[in-house]
Amino acid sequence: MIETIAYNTAQVLFVMAFAPLYAGVLSRLKEMVQSKRGPSVFQPYFDIFKLFHKDEVVSDQTTWVFRFTPYIVFVTPIFVTILIPVLTAYPLVFAFMGDMLAGGFFLGLGGFFAGLAAVDTGNPYGPMGASRTRMVGFLAEPVFMIVFFTVSFVAQSTIPYIVQQQWVANIGAFFSPAHMLLLIAFLMLILAEGGKIPVDNPTGHFELAMIDESKGLEFSGRGAALMKWGGQMKFLVLTCIFLNVLVAPWGLAASPAIQDVLAAVPLILVKILLFALVLVTIETSLAKLRLFRISEFLGAAFITSVAAMIASIFPGV
Amino acid sequence: MPTTIPEALNTLCAGLILITAFAMVATRQVQGVVRYFIVQSVLLAASSFLLAYDHNSIHLWALGAITIAAKVLAIPWVLKRLLPSDFYERREIAQAVNIPASLLLALVLTIFAEFLTGPLVAAAQNVVVSVNLPIGLAGILIGAYTLIARREAIPQLIGILAMENGAFFAGIAIAPELPLIAELAVAIDVVLIAVVVGLLTRTIRKTLGTTEAASLSELREEADAWR
């Protein structure tokens, strides 16, 4: 019992510690592909450190929503972390508190408050970004739902720890069309939810074209640091759900022994690095979509997920 | 559920073939359509090599080789040689139905294919058939749909070829011992279709300046009116 609580804490610490590194590695790899030098992979840590030591400026036009939002955005990915397998392949103490749907709700809560805070400031760019994020969000919602339906149909459960066992239990299940289609649908979702290039340009500085970034424009000091860190953790959590639950639980600790859990840390990091390479390939080889093309992109994700569902429902396949 | 590794990899190919079929419906660029067709043909060849290994069938080895030679190498080369390069650079190709609606229709066709092949799959009790038959039929239907919905000559041709890919993908599962002569005949046929359509398109384009099927609807009497 003590052990599993400790491991659960270790998972949270893992996500908190490596989320900025993941963001740094992603941007560094992207710069390398574009033959630029780019900042160090540790730059996000420096940024967060710097922001924590700066004064916070809060407009007197804002309400409590604006003040609370950074904390909510920071805490919700942590709640999701205790529900999903990050380091261990067996369920930990909070594993049965909530399923993947609960994780989706938690991340949605963070997004909801970030949107509210952006509207709260009265900055013209904030609400614009918030409404665009909502647009992407509600287009992504049905895809999430269908992915969960498919997963629950295949694995007879939506608890992440049980789902991940499904893909290694039988080699046929891993290579089945349903699994492949599901992976592609979820990858498209990650690109949309994480504000990556075909949907949104995370490095853009042009306010009119921003989707995700413009919500954080008004935050400063500690608030900005928490928003930034929270956003990075959210993306790492989404990646962990994708890699550890939906792709395959390779590299996760199989036994409760401490050395296994410690060995899982570098293995998971290698897995995430490989995924980062895929992500960078996608991001550098595609152009950002026009705003009204995003519905087509997520429509394609929806079609893919429904195809996954029918491939898993019909007999034999 | 597949049990051996070749069968499992075959189901992987099946899933990817379905995805490339969707991608051919979704993409706006002529170049993209051709590229997805090449990927689909490579997957088809891979699938037939895997099944050849599994069944120890010389026919399927030959079929895979023919697919590579005809569809991965010959047809793209022929199209590239016959048509000027601005053909491939064209984006936003004309479509009768817009892309999201097309994708939904492709999805409906896939469901229809699964539904239609359900009894056959249940009767066959064979893992490979259960994967290849519905997805092959879905490939045929989606290819036919591409043929109807696209208004450019080359994507229409690719629609025909994608139908053919679907038919082969279902065929290698239900009739692995198809005589080689039939396969050869089809493979040569397919390349000939590509040559004929390519030449025809080039001539039409030279005469009319466009290859959009929609603008070819009127029949005029004097040759001068065409220019």
Image (tube, rainbow, N blue to C red):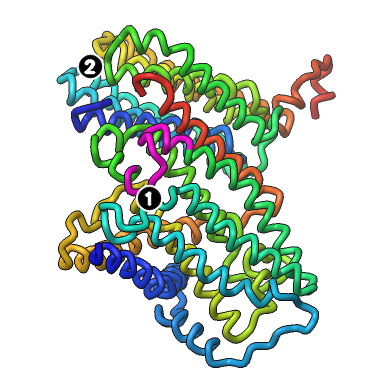
Chief secondary structure of the magenta portion: helix
Residue range of the region highlighted in magenta in the rendering: A149-162
Residue B196 in view: no
Residue A304 vs residue A259, the one in the foreground = A259
Q: Which residue is mark 2?
A: B59
Q: Residue furthest front?
A: A1
Residue B9 painted magenta: no
Could you tell me which residue is drawn at 63 percent across and 21 percent down? B148
Up-down relation of residue A169 to residue A212 (above or below) = above
Chain to which the residue tagged by mark 1 belongs: A
The quarter of the displayed image where residue B63 is located: top left
Q: Position of residue B192 (x, y in %)?
A: 46, 19
Q: Which residue is mark 1?
A: A96
Could you tell me which residue is drawn at 71 percent across and 84 percent down? A58
Residue A315 vs residue B100, the one in the foreground = A315
Tell me the SS state at disc 2.
helix
Residue A193 in view: yes
**Residue B27: assigned label:** none
Q: Amino acid at mark 1?
A: Phe
Residue B58 vs residue B203, the one in the foreground = B58
Chain to which the residue tagged by mark 2 belongs: B
The quarter of the displayed image where residue B203 is located: top right
Residue B72 vs residue B209, the one in the foreground = B72
Q: Amino acid at mark 2?
A: His
Left or right? Give the position of B23 relative to A262: right
